Amino acid sequence: MPARSAIVVGGTGEIGKAVLARLRAEGLRAVCASNDVRQETPDALRVDVTDEASVSTMFEKAEQALGPITLLVNCSGVGIFAPLSELSAEDWRRTIDVNLTGAFLCSREAFKRMKAHGGGRIIHMGSVSDHLALVHNAAYAASKHGLRGLTGVLNEEGKTSSIRATLLSLGAVYTSFWHSRPEFSPSDMLSVDDVAQSIWEIAQKPLNVRVDELRLLPSKGVL
């Protein structure tokens, strides 16, 4: 059965907002979960993805508001880019904690609940860095390669419980991150709506269909 209720982690970011808007426009009940939520409502819950208790509490509140969660979209992430010789251990840990440990904690919580309720989908935001070696991407690439492994294990452990996981491997997406880089044109990049459209297409598929990975690139490929 296609997704009916969703949590979008990182829902206050530019991609997360677009995903939430698209899912809600298609009739899904969707909760925004983010560390940037200041005033909680049934549709917006605060979560620190690096903290087990915070993740568990957020899922509990979301299911109280929506019922069983059938879709988790993990848009939460940080990008710290520096030459390997200059990358601090603090920045390495921060990147792994948010991008990988956070995805693990949210996926684990979703997996347990989906297994009890008959299945669901988990979608992770990957990157070209999850399969290509790019300079100044040591921490980011390590976190995204980790997501690739996590997604694969979720599919293997979930295949008899109707739990499906997808790594959505993204090329350049135009957000405010690029405002300080005028040499890159928005027309050469994906839009946040392109990403939201792909997530919706995955989310509406029945659970007998697996989409293990989708690579979404702008027309010029890797910029």
Image (tube, helix red, strand yellow):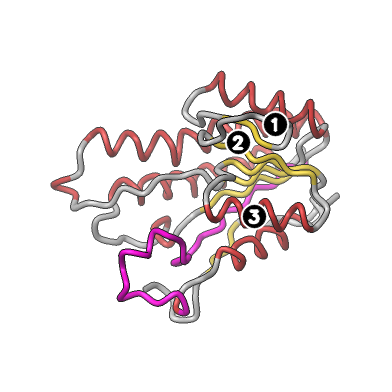
Q: Is residue 147 magenta?
A: no
Q: Amino acid at mark 1?
A: Thr
Nearest to the observer: residue 188 or residue 166: 188
Instruction: Please provide the residue range marked out in magenta.
Output: 162-187
x and y percentages locating residue 190 in the rendered image = 51, 70
Q: Amino acid at mark 2?
A: Ser
Q: Residues within 10 Å of mark 1 (few under 14, many from 20)?
A: few
The residue that disc 1 covers is 41
Mark 3 element type:
helix
The residue that disc 2 covers is 107
Residue 122 vertical placement versus 65 (above, below): below
Marks 2 and 1 sit apart, C-alpha to C-alpha, by 23 Å
Q: Quadrant of residue 41?
A: top right
Marks 3 and 2 sit apart, C-alpha to C-alpha, by 18 Å
Q: Give the residue drawn at x 47%, y 79%.
A: 187
Tag on residue 19?
A: 3
x and y percentages locating residue 111 in the rendered image = 67, 33
Residue 182 vertical placement versus 144 (above, below): below
x and y percentages locating residue 24 in the rendered image = 76, 52
Instruction: Mark 1 or mark 3: name the one nearer the start of the chain.
Output: 3
x and y percentages locating residue 44 in the rendered image = 66, 36
